[in-house]
Image (cartoon, rainbow, N blue to C red):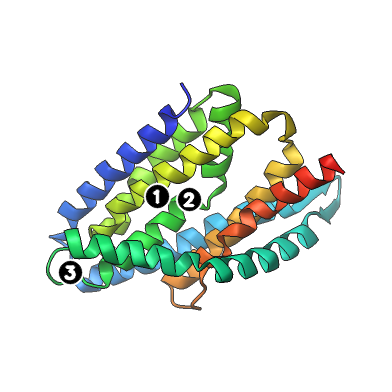
Amino acid sequence: MAGLGTLVNVFAILVGGAAGLILKRFLSKRITDTVMQGVGLAIIVVGLSGALSAAFIVLGETVSSRYILTMIISLAIGALLGELIGIESKLDAFARFCEKKFARPGETGAFAQGFVTAALVFCVGSMAIIGSIEEGVNKNSDILFAKSALDGIIAMILSSTMGIGVLFSAITVGVYQGVITLLAIFIAPYISLELVTQISLIGSVLIMSIGMNLLKIAKIKTGNLLPAIFIPVIYYLIRLLV
């Protein structure tokens, strides 16, 4: 059933996030700050491992790079489009709207940070994209089921440090993965392993940027870089038509 994996994913985030809110009551700020640093480091490692596996290939005793130029061009064009559209500011605006309606006293600011951070973590990874494509093309939800288990744990950790805003990221996940699944049904004949690998590479780089933001190494507008994920798709389709 197309869409089942995404529904399970949304449910897992809500359950994990709710568990994290309960856990939050028993944690001091000192503990939550240290946990957040650990999460930031883990996210960077996950992104780095994904980027290395996609960008480099081992042939015997030789290591060759691939898709580096595609990644650079995609990030540059994606950043331009993201800034013109203002994706990050729109995510923040939606978070602020939800914050006014649902945030608890004292969570102002933390709500938006939790929502935006969680939404990006759950959406830009390769499992979100590849899993949604697999579900749309082959009606196989196994990847999204595995992602659901991971996201549930991550949601619990993030909500225990960032609050209820993390739960509302489930809305973004439902829309994002649902749209990709629907599109995959129609563009299935044009999807190749090469294309999926390029998308995974860019997604992994964006995951690293999220970890850097959490550790306050840099302030990267990851939301405005999201269009970069779809630049290889556009290029691939143009190449097929031409």
Q: 188 or 210, which is in the foreground?
A: 188
Q: Residue at x 57, y 66 (%)?
A: 82
Q: Is residue 111 visible?
A: yes
Q: Which mark is residue 28?
A: 3
In this figure, which residue is indicated by the disc labeled 2? 123
Tell me whether the residue at label 2 lies in contact with that at label 1, contact meaning CB atoms closer than 8 angstroms: yes
Mark 2 lies on a secondary structure that is helix
Q: Residue at x 46, y 67 (%)?
A: 88
Question: Label 2: few (<14), some or many (≥20) within 10 Å?
Answer: many
Mark 3 lies on a secondary structure that is loop
What amino acid is labelled 1 in the image? Answer: Thr
What amino acid is labelled 3 in the image? Answer: Ser
Name which of mark 3 and mark 1 comes first in the sequence.
Answer: 3
Image quadrant containing the C terminus: top right
Mark 1 lies on a secondary structure that is helix
In this figure, which residue is indicated by the disc labeled 1? 172
Name which of mark 2 and mark 3 comes first in the sequence.
Answer: 3
Image spot of residue 174 (x, y percent): 40, 42
